[in-house]
Image: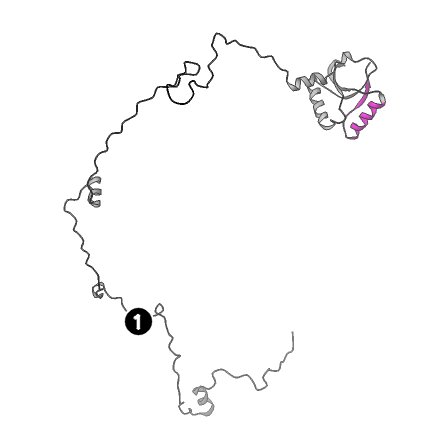
Amino acid sequence: DGPMRKAPDDPGGTPADHQGLTVNEVAANGVASAPRDRLVLAPPALALTEEDAPLSALTPAPSPEALPDVEGATDVSVAPLPDAVPTDIDEILNSLADAQPLEPLAPVATPAPQAAPAAAGLTTPAVAAGPGLARSLRPKARPAALARGVSPTPTPSPGAARASDLDLDPARIPAGTRLVQLGAYDSAEVARSEWERIDARFGDFLEGKKRVVQRATNAGRTFYRLRAHGFADLADARRFCSELVAQNAACIPVRVE
């Protein structure tokens, strides 16, 4: 790829290596040239720092004996250790601190225990003297002879009261009344719980409606119908079921026989 021959950038040729040496003159002329005026045998010496200098060039540090005397220096004398070294820790500390042993502390007087206050409901001591209340503000306990047990009246839970107001007895519904059936289940408890689930989804539609759980038997099997009461006529019941069926819920208009 590319030209087979290429002209050099310098028409005069490329200088060869090792030019100007005596050996080249001998090969070219047959005799050596005259000695040169200046001959360099090695590059100039490098200026090494103290950390780069060889170990032999480093100056050894002066010994402690050869240190010069400093004006104002004082001699420090070290006391020799005693022959008998104490083994008790208190004696060692006293000898190091050069202090006298501490005297034992005087026993601290323990205050006498105070009398426990009187129990609640018993005799309350009055203040002997000085400003303040003459009698404690704590109320006295009711005497045991006047204490009588009162049985609390059972209060129905909100859920039970709401269920009693919501449920409607099927026997009290006259024949021909229009209802809607929301499903049939194996037990009355399951039917009521299913009403709660439907109420969570369609609470606006069930506003003002009564829950009817009717027991029925068919082919020897007992089941419970879940129905809603509170419709004016068949058209009202059909409109109600059309809203629920549009949202994938079961609803069938029925009539009480």
Colour theme: one colour
Report whether residue 161 is seen. Answer: yes
Q: Is residue 34 above or below residue 159?
A: below
Q: Residue 100, image x and y in percent? A: 19, 41
Amino acid type of the residue that numbered disc 1 sits on in the rendered structure: Ala
Q: State the predominant SS element of the stretch in magenta.
A: helix
Q: On the image, numbered disc 1 is attached to which residue? A: 57
The residue drawn where x is 80% and y is 28% is 243
Q: Residue 147, image x and y in percent? A: 50, 9
The residue drawn where x is 29% and y is 70% is 56
Q: Is residue 94 magenta?
A: no
Report whether residue 187 is seen. Answer: no
Residue stretch rendered in magenta on the structure:
235-254
Q: Is residue 246 magenta?
A: yes
Q: Is residue 137 left or right of residue 150?
A: left
Q: Is residue 54 above or below residue 96?
A: below
Q: Residue 254, image x and y in percent? A: 81, 19
Q: Is residue 253 above or below residue 30?
A: above
